[in-house]
């Protein structure tokens, strides 16, 4: 009986395909999705149904189609389109390249070496400005020197570092 039931359902689907597709398309809101769901429904009907007697074959087939359409929509919502993949591939990697990192570390190491060679007060002034973020006025008060001396030491330190950097290039 099950084999006859499956054959009867497939025959019913084939005979009423247009009307079932149209009803399913209205329910799911997408005729292409309805078509895909009915193809999968036809495949599912090839195996024997769970029941021996189906009172309303059209409703039964429509319910299978709706469930399959819902499954298809869920799968599609989890997947990424080809356009989205291509757009993601074109995004720039915000991380610097390895060679850039190596060069930057070498430059910082060289700068620190040159800073260490500065006279003690110039070294203190330049580090307080650029590392600690202190104002020249705050540095003058902290080191108990004049603002003019801070300005002079900062300029000398910066000029020395610029000169050493230009010689390395």
Image (spheres, helix red, strand yellow):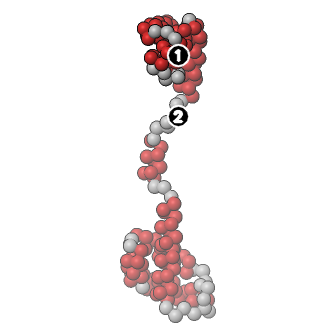
Residue at figure coordinates x 56%, y 26% from the top left: 101
Sequence-earlier tag: 1 or 2: 2
Q: Position of residue 15 (x, y in %)?
A: 43, 86
Label 1 Cα neighbours within 10 Å, binned few <14 / some 14-19 / many ≥20: few
Label 2 Cα neighbours within 10 Å, binned few <14 / some 14-19 / many ≥20: few
Q: Position of residue 20 (x, y in %)?
A: 42, 82
Q: Nearer the viewer, residue 147 or 131?
A: 147
Give above or below for 21 relative to 88. below
Q: Nearer the viewer, residue 60 or 70?
A: 70
Q: Nearer the viewer, mark 1 or mark 2?
A: 1
Badge 1 marks a residue whose secondary structure is: helix
The tag on residue 94 is none
Q: Which residue is mark 1?
A: 142
Q: Position of residue 40 (x, y in %)?
A: 51, 73
Residue at figure coordinates x 60%, y 80% from the top left: 47
Q: Is residue 155 visible?
A: no
Figure quadrant of residue 22? bottom left
Give above or below for 119 relative to 5. above
Residue at figure coordinates x 49%, y 82% from the top left: 63
Q: Which residue is mark 2?
A: 95
Q: Residue 136 vs residue 6: left or right?
A: left
Q: Position of residue 34 (x, y in %)?
A: 43, 74
Residue at figure coordinates x 57%, y 28% from the top left: 98
Badge 2 marks a residue whose secondary structure is: loop
């Amino acid at each position: 009986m099950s084999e006859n039931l499956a054959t009867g359902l497939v025959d019913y689907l084939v005979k009423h395909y247009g009307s079932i597709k149209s009803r399913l398309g209205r329910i799911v809101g997408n005729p292409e999705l309805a078509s895909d769901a009915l193809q999968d429904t036809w495949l599912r009907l090839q195996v024997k149904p769970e029941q021996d007697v189906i009172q309303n074959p059209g409703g039964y087939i429509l319910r299978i189609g709706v469930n399959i359409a819902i499954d298809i929509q869920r799968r599609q919502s989890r997947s990424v389109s080809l356009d989205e993949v291509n757009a993601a591939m074109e995004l720039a990697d915000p991380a610097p390249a390895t060679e850039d990192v190596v060069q930057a570390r070498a430059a910082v190491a060289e700068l620190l070496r040159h800073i260490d060679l500065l006279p003690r007060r110039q070294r203190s002034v330049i580090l307080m400005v650029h590392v600690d973020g202190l104002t020249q006025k705050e540095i003058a008060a902290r080191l108990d020197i004049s603002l003019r001396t801070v300005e002079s030491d900062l300029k000398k330190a910066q000029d020395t570092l610029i000169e050493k950097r230009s010689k390395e290039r």
